[in-house]
């Protein structure tokens, strides 16, 4: 099928306006990465200050939202929008954000750009995340329960580790691309649930297994560093809060975000204004489900060269210039859930 139709920004924005919107800041991407990690630290510190287990529940919910934020910033890095220096941009996306949640920048980039090219068409590698909708309330609740009880996390990570073990064996045998498989489109074996949205589906090859082994290695290294910091500064509790959030509320936030972006939107290569949803998010929703302007997903698909911190400005300009009626918009995540669940 043909690629999704592109929108010429010159038909909407003045030349100097467009240059300003697409300029990648030398400091804002790094600041957002620091903000993401600093928020996690402050949430954990606040829970420890309360010194009661009842504070752990809101802390785990908020940490899951910040972990999603790190994943979103990895996505920014995949688009080259964290920093104008490509090497530093890739380091921020690979090590400072993606590794913490088990994602690989390089494989994700190749896979994700295919998603942009064929959004909501059969060739879209993310179509499996939106195709099941609308669905029944019971089906959605079963998925949410699996997320919040850690079942999704365990299923995904165990499958990932099995493939990584194959990759380690291949590297020890001197297998193909043992240096890392950076050009492979392989990623993790669990994309279809939606964890993904963070990784490319594996290609089943030896090179793919090696790429997954490198991804798992980075993930485990970051977890080891976090555990060491936790034990040095306070004990087990900070790391356990991080890990429980990663296994539960992060999975839940990731699922809701994936649903909101494309479920029950238009398909086919026609009007690109309708292929992704923008969800107006409250402060609470931004904290838990929509960090770093990820709710402006229609704008991101229309103009993927715009950094996340300018998407709200793009939205305002599109509305001011009469394009709102062409867009798929929702007034909050509760409204999205009503749209994607059958009566």
Image (spheres, rainbow, N blue to C red):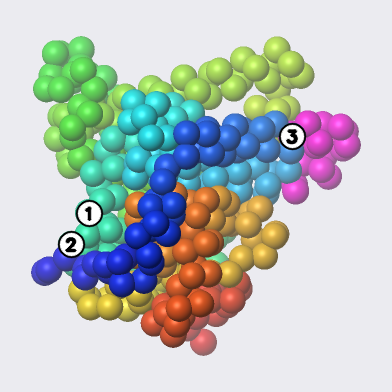
On the picture, is 200 further left or further right than 85? left
Residue 45 painted magenta: yes
Q: Which mark is residue 42?
A: 3
Q: Which residue is mark 2?
A: 123
Q: Quadrant of residue 34?
A: top right
Query: In the depicted view, which residue is nearer to us: 77 or 124?
Result: 77
Which one is earlier in the sequence, the residue at label 1 or at label 3?
A: 3
User: What whole-number distance in Å separates the C-alpha atoms at marks 1 and 3?
Assistant: 37 Å
Q: Say whether residue 215 is left or right of residue 48.
A: left
List x then y, in percent, for residue 140. Answer: 50, 68
Reply yes or no: does residue 200 show up in magenta.
no
x, y percentage for residue 120? 27, 69
Question: Residue at image x 62%, y 15%?
Answer: 228
Where does residue 311 sit, x and y in percent of width and height? 48, 58
Q: Earlier in the sequence, mark 1 or mark 2?
A: 1
- Image point (69%, 16%), residue name: 231
Q: Main secondary structure of the magenta part?
A: helix
Q: Which residues are magenta?
A: 44-58
Please give the name of the residue rendered at 42% of the width and 35% of the height, measured from the top-left corner. Answer: 83
Asked if the residue at tag 3 contacts the one at tag 1, i.e. Cβ–Cβ closer than 8 Å, the answer is: no
Element carrying mark 1:
helix
Q: Is residue 269 visible?
A: yes
Pinpoint residue 157: horizontal percent, then vertical percent: 42, 37
Label 1 or label 2, whichever lies nearer to me, is 1
Mark 1 = which residue? 114
Q: Nearer the viewer, residue 308 or 142?
A: 308
Q: Is 92 drawn above or below residue 121 in the view shown?
A: above
User: How far apart are labels 1 and 2 at the CA level?
Assistant: 8 Å
Quadrant where the N terminus sits is: bottom left
Q: Residue at x 53, y 69 (%)?
A: 316
Comparing 287 with 157, the one in front is 287
């Amino acid at each position: 099928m043909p690629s999704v139709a592109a929108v010429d920004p010159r038909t909407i924005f003045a030349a100097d306006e467009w240059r300003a919107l697409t300029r990648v800041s030398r400091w804002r991407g790094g600041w957002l990465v620091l903000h993401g990690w600093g928020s996690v630290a402050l949430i954990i510190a606040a829970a420890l200050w309360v010194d009661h287990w009842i504070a752990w529940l809101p802390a785990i919910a908020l940490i899951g939202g910040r972990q999603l934020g790190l994943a979103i910033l990895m996505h920014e890095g995949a688009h080259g929008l964290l920093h104008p220096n490509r090497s530093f941009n890739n380091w921020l996306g690979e090590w400072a954000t993606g590794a913490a949640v088990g994602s690989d920048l390089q494989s994700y980039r190749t896979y994700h750009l295919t998603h942009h090219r064929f959004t909501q068409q059969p060739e879209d590698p993310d179509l499996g995340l939106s195709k099941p909708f609308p669905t029944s309330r019971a089906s959605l609740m079963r998925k949410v329960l699996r997320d919040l009880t850690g079942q999704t996390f365990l299923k995904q990570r165990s499958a990932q580790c099995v493939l990584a073990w194959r990759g380690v064996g291949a590297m020890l045998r001197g297998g193909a691309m043992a240096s890392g498989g950076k050009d492979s489109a392989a990623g993790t074996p669990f994309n279809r649930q939606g964890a993904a949205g963070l990784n490319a589906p594996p290609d089943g090859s030896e090179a793919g297994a090696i790429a997954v082994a490198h991804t798992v290695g980075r993930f485990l290294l970051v977890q080891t560093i976090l555990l060491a910091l936790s034990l040095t500064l306070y004990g087990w509790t900070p790391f356990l809060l991080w890990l429980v959030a990663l296994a539960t509320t992060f999975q839940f936030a990731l699922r809701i975000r994936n649903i909101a972006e494309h479920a029950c939107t238009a398909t086919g290569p026609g009007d690109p204004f309708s292929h992704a949803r923008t969800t107006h998010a409250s402060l609470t929703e931004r904290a838990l489900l929509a960090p770093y302007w990820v709710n402006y997903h229609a704008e991101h698909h229309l103009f993927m060269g715009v950094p996340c911190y300018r998407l709200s400005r793009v939205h305002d300009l599109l509305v001011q210039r009469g394009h709102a009626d062409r867009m798929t918009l929702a007034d909050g995540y509760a409204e999205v859930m009503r749209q994607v669940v059958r009566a």
